[in-house]
Image (spheres, rainbow, N blue to C red):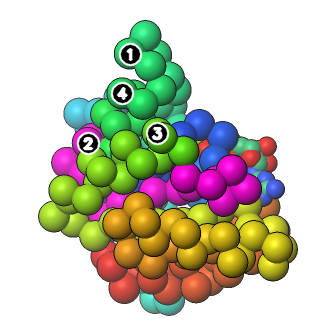
Amino acid sequence: AQPVLAVVGRPNVGKSTLVNRILGRREAVVQDVPGVTRDRVAYDAFWAGRRFTLVDTGGWEPDATGLQASVAAQAEMAMATADAVLLVIDASVGATATDEAVSKVLRRSKKPVLLAANKVDDDRLLADTASLWSLGLGEPHPVSALHGRSSGDLLDSIVKAL
Ligand code: GDP
Ligand code: MG
């Protein structure tokens, strides 16, 4: 089976936009991932000669347990079921308490974790993304899912991690 990358993060940080950006023009293949919630949608992705499965955890919206608990649960599920995890942060907002909580969960991961600082649409936000090193997840990868900025660099890091 091909390696699985799970994309996690707060609602609205641009996870689904980034998934579409990574998929590019390829037609998304929607599959049911056995044993997990139907809200998780898996797509067939391809980069630099490598195939992998991309799981958009977008269905995980805040429920009765609150945003922080539900995003932490999303991260736990990702660590348990994927080969690598991509945490997406909204760089225009910066790291929130929820981002810090989910990073703490992900720091326990024995699997590779990558950090994307999304919504870096122009150079203005580039310098700020260095502060995301403090999340303890290694190098922040500045990207703009909307405009495609640096998504190739992120993909290079993803396939290296898988
Ligand atoms: P998700 O809830 O994390 O899956 O986030 P979505 O992909 O649905 O995006 C939430 C909002 O952020 C949408 O209005 C997107 O157009 C916007 N968005 C996503 N990526 C970017 C980006 O790189 N730059 C900007 N400015 N907006 C973005
Ligand atoms: Mg989404």
Q: Nearer the viewer, mark 3 or mark 2?
A: 3
Q: Which residue is mark 4?
A: 69
Which numbered tag is attached to residue 76? 2
Which numbered tag is attached to residue 65? 1
Label 3 or label 2, whichever comes before in sequence order: 2
The location of residue 10, given as percent across then percent down, is 53, 40
Label 1 or label 2, whichever comes before in sequence order: 1
Task: For residue 20, say whether it is visible.
Answer: no
Three-letter code for the amino acid on which mark 2 is drawn: Glu
The location of residue 106, given as percent across then percent down, is 29, 54
User: Between marks 3 and 4, how big is the CA–CA gap?
Assistant: 9 Å
Pick whichever, 67 or 111, lies toward us: 67
Three-letter code for the amino acid on which mark 3 is drawn: Thr
Taking the image as shown, residue 157 lies to the left or right of residue 18, namely: left
User: Between marks 1 and 3, how big is the CA–CA gap?
Assistant: 13 Å
Name, please, the residue furthest toward the top: 64
Query: How would you rate the neighbour count of disc 3 (Cα within 10 Å): few for under 14, some for 14-19, many for 20 or more?
Result: some
Q: Which residue is rendered at x = 36% and y = 67% of the image?
A: 137
Pick whichever, 41 or 117, lies toward us: 117
Q: Which corner quadrant holds the C terminus?
A: bottom left
Three-letter code for the amino acid on which mark 1 is drawn: Thr
Label 3 or label 4, whichever comes before in sequence order: 4
Kindly check if marks 1 and 4 are in contact, taking CB atoms under 8 A apart as contact: yes
Taking the image as shown, residue 101 lies to the left or right of residue 144, namely: left
Query: How would you rate the neighbour count of disc 1 (Cα within 10 Å): few for under 14, some for 14-19, many for 20 or more?
Result: few
Which numbered tag is attached to residue 98? 3
User: Between marks 1 and 2, how big is the CA–CA gap?
Assistant: 15 Å
Kindly check if marks 1 and 2 are in contact, taking CB atoms under 8 A apart as contact: no
- Tell me the quarter of the picture where residue 139 sits: bottom left
